[in-house]
Every structure is written in C-alpha cells, then in structure tokens.
Image (tube, rainbow, N blue to C red):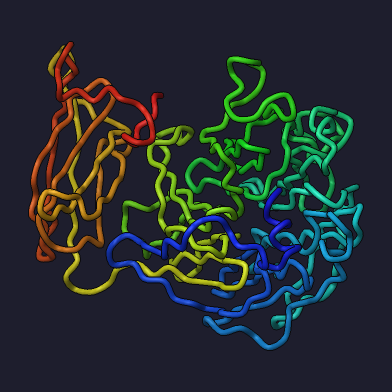
Amino acid sequence: MSRLIGVCVSILLVVFFFSEAGSQLPIGFTIETIVSDAKIPVSLAVVPDGRIFYAELLTGSIRVLKDGMLQPEPFTTLEVVTSFDVGGARGLGLLDLTPDPDFVSNHFLYALYTPTSDEIVVSRFRDFEGIGIDEVEILRQPGDGKHNGGRIVFLPDRTLLVTRGDTGFQNLAQDDEVVQGKILRMNADGSIPENNPTPDSPVFASGVRNSFGIAVHPVTGEAFFSENGRNDDEINLLTEDGNYGWPICMGNCGFENTSFIDPIVNFTPSICPTGMDFYSGNTFPEQYRNDLFFADCNTGRVQRIKLIPPSYDHVAILEDFVSGKADGTLDVKTGSDGNLYYTTFSEILRIVPPSGDQLAEFRGRVTRVDAEENENAVVGANVVLKKRNAGITVFKYRTLTEKNGKYRFTGLPEGEYRVVIKMKGFQKEKSFVILNSTEPTVLNIVLSSCQANTSRCFEKVGFQETILSF
C-alpha cells in the first residue's frame, strides 16, 4: 500500500505516468458502472443476500449496494484519522471489511480502521436492516501513520487473518515480540487460537513490509497475500510460521537465505498490488473458475492468475484481465450474482461475462502413454486457444488441464481456432478446430515425450510462455 495512500493524499491531483490503455477485456465481456462518484472505495465485502458493502477510505463510511443501487444511508460512519489529518502519513482511514462466515445467521460485519494515527482497530458490527449496530471492538494494536497493512479475511476454520505492515519501522518485521510486519491469526472474538505457531501470540507469519491484499483459495482453503515492496512487489502463499524476508530481502530470496519463503510471483518495478479474490461464482466461463484476480494501484489493471492443480501452489498463467486505466484499481470481489466487481479511486464497476445463443463450448482430455503403454492423465498442461485473422492472433484464451487431465472452455464466440497444448518435457501439439453453438467440440490429445533437438518440444519456461517450472 506504499503508493496507494500517497495518491490519496493528493486526491488524484497527481497524474499517473502512463497513457490510458482502456479497459480491454476478453471477447464478449462488458464493464458496467455501478457507482460513478464513489469516494475512494478501498474495500468491497459481499454478503450472501446479494448486497455489497464498501468502505470509503477517508470518510470512514461503510456504504451499501442493494440490487445494484446505492442505499441513501451509510451502514455506519466511523471516526477515523486519515492521511489528510497527519502530515506525511500513508496508511490511515477505513481500510477493510469482511463478513462473518455465518453472516446469514449472526449478521456480523467486521471493519479494520485507524481511530488515531498510532492505532489500528478491528470492530464487529451487527447488520440490522442495513444499519450497523452493537459495535464490539475485538482488536486494538499499535500502528503508525504508514504501512499499517490493513486487510482481513476468514479462513475455513473460522479464524480471522489480519495483515499488518511494518508501520515504517522495517526492523520490526523480524522482531518476534511485536505484531508489526506480520500476518496475524485470531479467533472471531479477538482471542488467540491455541494452535498458533507461538502460544499466546497472534503472529502467524513474519517478514512482511506492507500487505494490502489477502484471499483464500476455494479448493485448498489456503490463503494468498500480496506484499508491497520498495521496488519488488510479491504475491505469496501463506505458510504457518513462514518468514517472507523483509527487510533482509524482497522478491526471490532463496539464494541469499533459504530460511525465507519466496513469492509465487514478484513484480519489478512495483505495481502496488491491492485487493484480491478467487473467482468462486458460476457465471463466468469455466476457464476462469477458481482463478485469482487482483487489482493494482500503480497501473490500474485487474490481473488474472491460474494456479497449477492439484496443489494450486505454483503459477501457470499470469495475464491482464482488465487493461490499465489512469485511475488505479483498489479491490476486486466475486459478487453473489456470479459477476466480478472491482473498484477504482472513484468508481465501482461490474464485469459481466458473455451471454447469448451464439456461444460455443470446447473441451477434451490430455494424456500421455508411459513405458508400459498405460494412458495417464496429464495435469497442469497449458491449453491455449487462439483466434487468428490474416495470420495475426486477435485474441487468445488459456486454461490448464485438471486432475483428470480434462480441460473445458465455455462462453466462446463461434469460429475457427488454433489450439496449442504444451507441457514442459513434452512435445507441443497444434491443431485447428471449428467451434459452433450447436454442440461442444471435443479434442483429446496424447502428448509425446520430448526428444533431444526436437523443435516442437516446449522447453522455454517463464510467463511469456505461461508455464512455470514445478
């Protein structure tokens, strides 16, 4: 969040140093503006009845969207110290919201905010007909004017994770006796779980500079969090008692100190990753199911990550989903309607997937034959579906084969496509298919092991080829 609040202080009077690229999306997707004059909607929280709560960073107000309409009265308005109140401060205000896992029955919504310039608070409110009542403070900790972190999310075991930055004092991140520069884990009432790494301590992981994004994988239940560095930003898989290296190193630290956990992705120069969410709806085409979407404040994009099954702990695909805009992006969440919502400094927008009768499905299975001539599923193979015009790729879709070797694309425009299936250690397979809306097109592929000096072998590893070594 290092650059996020700096932009807030200037209230967008500073112009970002890149050109407007537009909000290009995969073919058939559209963007709808839900709120056009939002006041720095830094966080979204979706509840099962379809409402969306959002936090206004500087006003301290929690607002409510119901059926796509902004309700006239705030849920509540908190007294917050902001970057305007404390000169040179970055990281103050109403920072995050999250609903209780049992919201349907208990109606609890949690908020993280800064009531003073040197404290952070997590409070619980009860929703009563759209108004927050019965505030209960569950956490109060020392903070500072900057690097407060400030994201909260529940794990499947109903414990609460809280991201804490180093508050501008980098050595605190390696100090086991303090909470700054840590990921914290606590019970919903603020008490410390008995199975935390250190008895009577909320610290779950350390070595964090400033984290302003955290999300839980819908299949594995593991948490992933973003890290705002000086020049290196990260996305990390959260490991119990893990140390992520700050301030000793950022980015890939493995060669310097093997006791530190390397990120699954790092970005140089900084992009300022902010809110994130795993897509868990049923409305988007199949190829986006369980993918990690995250916002970034510096370039104004929404990016997509697909992780390799079955462990989902390595990145296979990293690509832009929404191209950059001058107004940076702050948060992204899956709505109860199955659409994806994201925020900029002044808007709340909804991404709507393709619809209509002229949409095709493409699926199949990728296997290999072993030395005993048994056919085995290939897991994590990269399937790229390209639409070409005059020899130029106009757009492409990407997915991976799952645990059974199967892949599936839905919501595709009809037409002829080029298909490339690739996996490290195997020969590339290239085909052409014609997709139509009357019935699914099926392509089953058997991959052959690479032979030395075979030009069709896929050996290059990296994001340009969308496969990482694993």
The quadrant in which the C terminus is found is: top left
Is residue 115 toward the left or the right of residue 63 in the image?
A: right
Vertical position of residue 340 compared to residue 178: above or below = below
Q: Position of residue 158 (x, y in %)?
A: 68, 50
Please state the horizontal and vertical placement of residue 137, each as a whole percent of the image. Answer: 87, 60
84, 198: nearer the viewer:
84
Residue 207 versus residue 64: which sits nearer the camera?
A: 207
Farthest bottom residue in view = 72
- Which image quarter: residue 180? top right
Residue at 20 percent across and 34 percent down: it is 366
Can residue 388 be seen in the rendering of this structure?
yes
Does residue 95 lie above or below 75 as drawn?
A: above
Q: Residue at x 30, y 45 (%)?
A: 399
Residue displayed at 57% across by 47% down: 271
Q: Position of residue 88 (x, y in %)?
A: 84, 54
Q: Is residue 391 above or below residue 79?
A: above
The answer to whether residue 108 shows anywhere in this view is: no
**Number of callouts in the render?**
0
Q: Residue at x 87, y 64 (%)?
A: 81
Name the spot of residue 268 as percent of width and height, x first: 55, 37
Residue 201 is drawn in which quadrant? top right
Horizontal relation, residue 271 to residue 423: left or right = right
In the picture, measured across the screen, residue 244 lies left or right of residue 143, that is left
